[in-house]
Each structure stands twice: as structure tokens, then as C-alpha cells.
Amino acid sequence: MYNIPVKTIQGWIDMGKCSLCPRECGIDRSGDRRGFCKSPDAFFVSKIMLHKWEEPCISGENGAGTVFFGGCNLGCIYCQNRAISRGERGEIMTDEQLEAEIFALCDKGASCIEFVTPTHYTRRLAALLSRIKNKIPVPIVYNSGGYDSVESLKKLDGLIDIYMPDFKYFSSEIAKKYSSAPDYAEIALPALKEMLRQVGSPKYSDRDTARLKSGVILRHLILPSHRRDSIDVLELLAREIGAKNLVLSLMGQYTPDFYIEFEKENGEREDCKNLRRRITSFEYNSVLDAANRLGFSGYMQDISSSSAKYTPDF
């Protein structure tokens, strides 16, 4: 049997084989089978809301109009969205249903339309946005774990205003242990460069200089016992990308609640026992000092935010 390429308006895809993310599972998600992301081919949406706890430059007064997709191509063992990242909560939506929800968020005064964990929907999302982008009066935000395929991101060229990826790890050993992605950094760096190629350096609204109009917000979560890895990430970004080309969102919100839930379901792991605690002031301040030394600007989240109460109720 031959794989016959199918031409779409967004580019070439292989019929019946998913290669949207770097894992390239090769699964036909149009049926009952699921790849690493545990998601169908159709939009699987876990929550739609006005999210007021995102970075101020995209939250605005009313909050970001946020669409949380179910499933994830990383599966981090400490994930704060683990209630939905495993693909167990949500509902299948047609393109038309999601379109209606997007415009409903705009009608409610959303400061942007934000798609959370969209990596495994890049092709379908590109097709949807190609139809409606010009009708959406606010910026479009792509919020991913940073483990994105450059080829998939190219499908979104001209359709995304603000990219908001994570850059989680420098060490392949840590990335493998926590997210089953030993190649994380070598995938995330070219993905980030592609995002920057598309949207450029940060640009703010002429009417409201606190509102980001386009650019890249780069998130990094400091993990317990891994301040050195966080500093390595920042040094890599400063060297390869340039601190002034990003809005850095340095997060101190790590909470062990979700990892403890993981251990309850999967058994205790002594090699990850550091994840059972919050980060210390020393860990937080040493990474913050490195960010300042390297010339980053943006948002530095205080460790007092390390609580599950800031996670949406899924």
C-alpha cells in the first residue's frame, strides 16, 4: 500500500500519518488510535474561559480569551494542567463550533485569543485561522510547551501574532526524566528561532503601551534542585537569540501538588524526590540574578505564587 501525499492549502501532509510534532508518531488520529498526545484529529477542547492570570501584557483588563486543548506532546510528570494534558477531559468540537466560541470570547472583551497546548493541532488550527484571522480584532497567541516542529510552525506563518512557548530544559538528562524528551533543547531552539522569524521582536500597541501586539513571550519554570539548568537555559537564549528579542516570563510558581498526584498513580520515584518540594528563595534569586545579568526584561513571578490555586479549575 502506498502513502499518497495530499495537497492542502497549508502544505503537504501524509495521509493517515501524524507528524505534526517532533515525536512523529505516525498515528492515524482520524480513527480511534491516539499517539503520544492522546488526542484525536478533531479539536478536543477541555476548557474555554477568560483567563486573568496570564502575563499582564496579554491579559489586559478582562483576561485572555483562552482555549485549552486536551492532550499534550510532552506529558511532564509535574504538569499543572495534568487534569487535561492526559487527554481525559474535554469534548470534541467541529471547526465551526470552535469558531463560534472564539467570536464569543471576543464579544466578552477578551484581550487576545490564546490557544493553549496547540502543537498537535497546528494543521487544523492553520486551516481555521486562514478563514477567520482577519475577522478577529485582537492578537492571536500560540501558547505551547516549546516542543514544536519547525515544519508545523511554518503552517502558521502570518496567522499568529504572539508566540508564548516554554523553554523548559537545557539538560537532555533532565528533559528525558521529566518529559520523555531527551532532545528537548535541540528541538526547542530552532522552533523558537522560527517563531521569531515569523513575528519579530516585541511590539506594543500604540494605544496601550502595556499591551503586546506581536512578538515572543518566552516562559521558563524554575524547578527544585535545577537552578543551574535554568541558568544554562538563560545563557543559551541570550547567546543564540538575544535577550532584547524576547519578553521573558520567569516563573517561580512550581508547586509539588501535581507531581505528588503523579506519584500516587504511578508509584514513588526516588530519582525525582526533589519535585516533592517548592523552590527555595536561594534558587529563585540566583536564577533571577542571572536573568538580570544577561539583560532580560519581562515578568519575574514571585515564589509566593507557588500554589495550585492559580491553576484553572478543569
Image (cartoon, grey):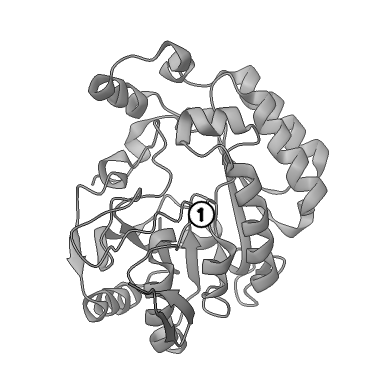
Residue lying at 57% horizontally and 80% vertically, measured from the top left: 158
Q: Amino acid at mark 1?
A: Pro
From this view, report whether residue 163 is shown above or below residue 224.
below
Residue 73 at x, y percent in the picture: 41, 49
Left or right for 201, reference 2: right
What percent of the width, then of the height, locates residue 133? 45, 84
At x 68%, y 65%, the residue is: 196
User: Which corner quadrant of the image does residue 8 belong to?
Assistant: bottom left
Reply above or below: 166 against 19: above
Q: Is residue 19 left or right of residue 151?
A: left
Mark 1 — residue? 22
- Name the residue at the top extreme: 270
Q: Is residue 248 visible?
A: no
Left or right side of 245 for 8? left
Q: Position of residue 292 (x, y in %)?
A: 77, 38
Tag 1: Cα neighbours inside 10 Å, few (<14), some, or many (≥20)? some
Q: Position of residue 44 (x, y in %)?
A: 25, 61
Position of the N terminus, as image quadrant, is: bottom left
